[in-house]
Each structure stands twice: as structure tokens, then as C-alpha cells.
Amino acid sequence: MTPDPSDVAAMRRAIALAADAGAAGEVPVGAVVVDGDGAIIGEGRNRREETHDPSAHAEVVAMREAAERSGSWNLDGCTLVVTLEPCVMCAGTLLQARISRLVFGAWDDKAGAAGSLYDVVRDRRLPYRAEVVGGVLEAETRAPLEEFFRARR
């Protein structure tokens, strides 16, 4: 399946944010929130080490910025684009924010909550679900993560 060009463009921005995270000594994950008109309204990169905040994952940082910029916690109609499949915390936050679509690059078979280990984002038992598009620019999003963790082993 060929990814949507607008998803690819947003993923390229998320990849740049992931590179910034890696340069700062963080796990190289980047995320953007795109509104219904295609404009990026929130950006984030991992900041846990920098802020000593366990919730400062790229997705949460991007959703916080998007909510602040839009003036609402309700991000219905928006797309979250992230370089790595979200964890359970980020998937739950995505649902609480009413994000309509999730687009991610690399699958995370150790902590992924959008189809790998869990599928929180599409769980029919929950009152809200999001569309999921995984594997967008997967090789480009996976390589910095593999390099980061290889250097730490």
C-alpha cells in the first residue's frame, strides 16, 4: 500500500524531530499533530531525560502543544504522526484527546499499543477508537532507533 503523500510529509517532519531528540541524548522519537486542513498544530520529541518527566514522550508533547494551540483538549479530526508505534500511555492519551487517525513508522513489538503487542487504539471495548496506518517510512524511522540502542548495549 502506498502511503498518503501528506502522511509522508508529516512523517518527514517527525523524523527530523526524532533526530533532534537523539542529538539531545533522548530515545529518537518524534511526533506531529496535523489538523483537518493539513497544518501541523503540534510538534514533539522525546524529552524524558531533559525534563525528568516520565510522561514526556514525543506523542504527549505534540498533543499538549496541539491542544494549547487549538484551545481545546478535543483534537477530533486530527492525525497524530509519530516515528514509533505508541506505547500504552500514549495510545490512551491519543484516545482521551479524540485523535481521529494515527500514522506511525516503526512497529514496536516490545511496547506497541496500536497493533503489535496491544491494540488499545482500536479496542472495541473502549468508547473511542482511531484509524491506524502503520509502517509509513518504516526503514527510515527504525534505523535511528536501532542505532541508538545498539550504541547503548
Image (tube, helix red, strand yellow):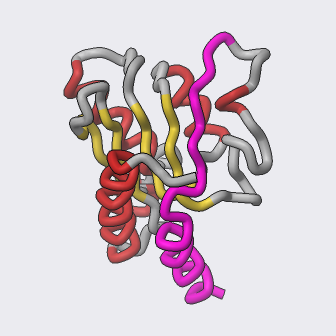
The part of the image, by quadrant, that contains residue 65 is: top left
Residue 135 location (% of width, % of height): 58, 56
Residue 59 location (% of width, % of height): 45, 44
Q: Nearer the viewer, residue 55 or 119?
A: 119
Q: Farthest front residue?
A: 1
Residue 101 location (% of width, % of height): 49, 31
Specify the quadrant that holds the C terminus. Answer: bottom right
Establish if 46 lies above or below 41.
below
Q: Nearer the viewer, residue 129 or 92?
A: 129
Q: Which residues are magenta?
A: 127-153
The part of the image, by quadrant, that contains residue 74 is: top left
Establish if 70 lies above or below 29.
above
The part of the image, by quadrant, that contains residue 142 is: bottom right
Give the left or right position of residue 44, taking residue 129 as reference: left
Residue at 71 percent of width and 32 percent of height = 120
Residue at 67 percent of width and 41 percent of height = 114
Asked whether 14 falls inside the magenta stretch, the response is: no
Give the left or right position of residue 35, taking residue 52 as reference: left
Numbered circles on residues, count? 0
Residue 23 location (% of width, % of height): 34, 76
Establish if 23 lies above or below 27.
below
Asked whether 129 falls inside the magenta stretch, the response is: yes
Give the left or right position of residue 114, taking residue 106 as reference: right
Residue at 54 percent of width and 72 percent of height = 139
Establish if 79 lies above or below 55.
above
Residue at 65 percent of width and 31 percent of height = 121
